Image (spheres, rainbow, N blue to C red):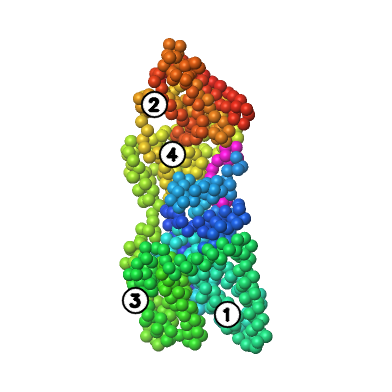
Amino acid sequence: MKNRIQKLLKNKTFQFSVILILSFLLLVGVRKNHLENNLNTYHDDEFHTVYLGIKSFETGTVENFRSLEGARWMYRLFYPGALIKMSQNMGGNTFLSGWEKPGHNYILNEYINKDINPSIVKQRLADDPNLRDFFYFLRLQSIVFVFICLIPLLYYCFKRNYSMSLFFLIVFPAINIQLTHEQSYAYIEPLLMGFISIITWLFLYLYDKRKISSFLMILLGLLSAFIISVKFSALIFVLLLLTMPFVNKEGGYDLETSLKKVFIVFGSFFLSFIIINYYGFFGDINVMLHDFVSNFWNYQNGQSALASNESTAGFNNNFKHVFIVLKDLIGYFIYLLPFVWIFGFYYSNKNEKMKLGILTIVLFISLFGLMKQVEFYERNIVPFYTPFLFISSAFLTIIIREFQNKLVFKNIKILKYLVVSFVLIAYIGVFNAHYDEVLPSTTNNFKAVINNIPDLQKRDMKFVNIDKEVISNYSNNKIDITTDIYFSQVNYKEKLKAIIDKLSYNDIVIVNRDKKNYNQYSNFLLPKYFNTNHQYGNYFVFYNKDLKNNKEDIKQLIDAPIDITDQIIIESIELDKLGENTYQVSLIFNDFLNESLIDSKKRYFYFHAYSYPNDINSLPADRIQYGFVNFDIIDFSITKEFGKPTIKKTFTSNLKQFALFRLGLVDIDNNLSVIKEFVINDVKL
């Protein structure tokens, strides 16, 4: 048994599998936790990637080309997966919500075809669990994509015993604050980081390859066209990729062979570039040319506050920013980096000198291009993390190997552990400053939200699928309302009513949706009844911001529901005194109202208040002959009164009583016919 375990531990496939699992937990698991604790985030630049990418499905056009189509195609690729996961969590079903609600229609109605002002979108994310789920799964796929792109380079490092490279490439991106911020959004830089990881690996792989086939050249052209369409800052790395067939010695350097390579590589590149940017070349090419070129103008001239000040703009200041970003990436070890690069290059063999030297030059030229711009963004450094970390750690590995060769350290493992320990110690100060942001606690955030609820002690705390230990520190009256929430077409009204009857306006409701069908609470039912909700992972907290007191001035005008039609049922009518001679009538409908049936553009309620004969002369002069005041409810909006669809009408009256209120629903499209009329007698205001 012992021999089998030892044999397994020495097995290269097993070793790399363990490395992959650890890297997945760090590069995806850590970021996933951060994403789950920052679900309300939205960046205005997601307009260029998510909004325009999805809207093109509806319109067949793209209206802005400040970024080309590469990133949009990636998010179009991620879009179906995000839709499916969002729809699975939405709750409701076909007879509750109809076939038209979920999926693509939901995103069109709640995101694409609404106001896209970033602050408004952010507020909708705060209000709508479904929209949060959509962006979460979209961003999570981007995180997984970056990890997948890194796997070939990790394997290259593993095969060549670049142990420090494995450590640098896995650990530092996982706990870096800048990358954490960027992967909180569905934007360009993280995608570009993934693609530059692919370029770095392809360069290392192709440099040693004896023959590059025509098919591989075509793929290089396609990949290069796609990456340059993601962001132009990858230009130097793309050029490196395009030149690889010419660096390869197979076939010699005769004119015929070179022309063949030029035709294949650059023919593939230009054809792929046109196809990838189809919406520009075959749409409005004038808009594409203007928007794309104007981006260069913006970067050269600047628009931000830093760019407008000579003391905070230009190469020297941008260099300081790059240094700070890279210091946040590898900590105080950055101060030793010049020595590591110099000695690492010195001790490299000829093959390593060529490969690492070329990568270093390409990296420096790319960073120089960013630093010389007037408009500088720290996020633009993120895509170059991979080659920077690989080069630095490869040189460090080479130095360690040299120590081993000179027998300075007989036990190379001890030396590696010492180096890793030193690097981590040098990083502790940087990591501590960002610990809570990089590694947020779902439980702590969840409890912090509860602690900040207004009038916390005056509310009942109701919960669904929550371990009582989690809320044991709260003295509120706690009630477990967890129940079967599976619906059928026959019983859904009774089941929903049974759940709703357990709720009240002033409650706090806490839900963990990680089991069974509890997303019916978190995504479908409770958002209708509470105007505020917070989410951390699968934990939700629902409440209404202001406590609602029972007001004696509110009067119930009907004793039983009124069926206007089978689908339009008025459950109650409330009369509220707002001030001297000012009143409000609220028509409160059944929870299952199909709101399209009382669209104010197609229907309205007439509302006539008849006076007693003795009071008729107190009516407005123009209404005395009719015997009633007209309070018709026209151009109304449907609001929610503790989740129930509600139409409100505010009116003024000198009279304190009426003989009757006569109301009726009028069908505008059907010659103003009255669908149903009802009367409320003896109304005291």
Nearest to viewer (mark 2 / mark 1): 2
Label 4 or label 2, whichever lies nearer to me, is 2
Magenta span dominant secondary structure: helix
How crowded pointer 1 is (Cα within 10 Å; few <14, some 14-19, many 20+) is rated as some
Magenta segment boundaries in residue numbering: 83-97
**Secondary structure at numbered mark 2:** strand
Name the residue tied to disc 2: 582
Residue at image mark 4: 530
For marks 4 and 1 on the same chain, the one whose residue lies earlier in the sequence: 1
* Residue 126 in the image, given as x and y percentages of width and height: 44, 47
Instruction: Check disc 3 and report its element: helix, strand or loop.
Output: helix
Label 4, label 2: how many angstroms apart (C-alpha)?
27 Å
Residue 287: name its quadrant: bottom right
Q: Mark 1 or 3 closer to N-term? A: 1
Asked whether the beta carbons under mark 3 and mark 4 sit within 8 Å of each other, the answer is no
Quarter holding residue 288? bottom right
Please report the residue visible at 48 percent of the width from the left and 31 percent of the height from the top: 647
Tell me the residue that label 1 is attached to.
244
Residue 271 appears anywhere in the view: yes
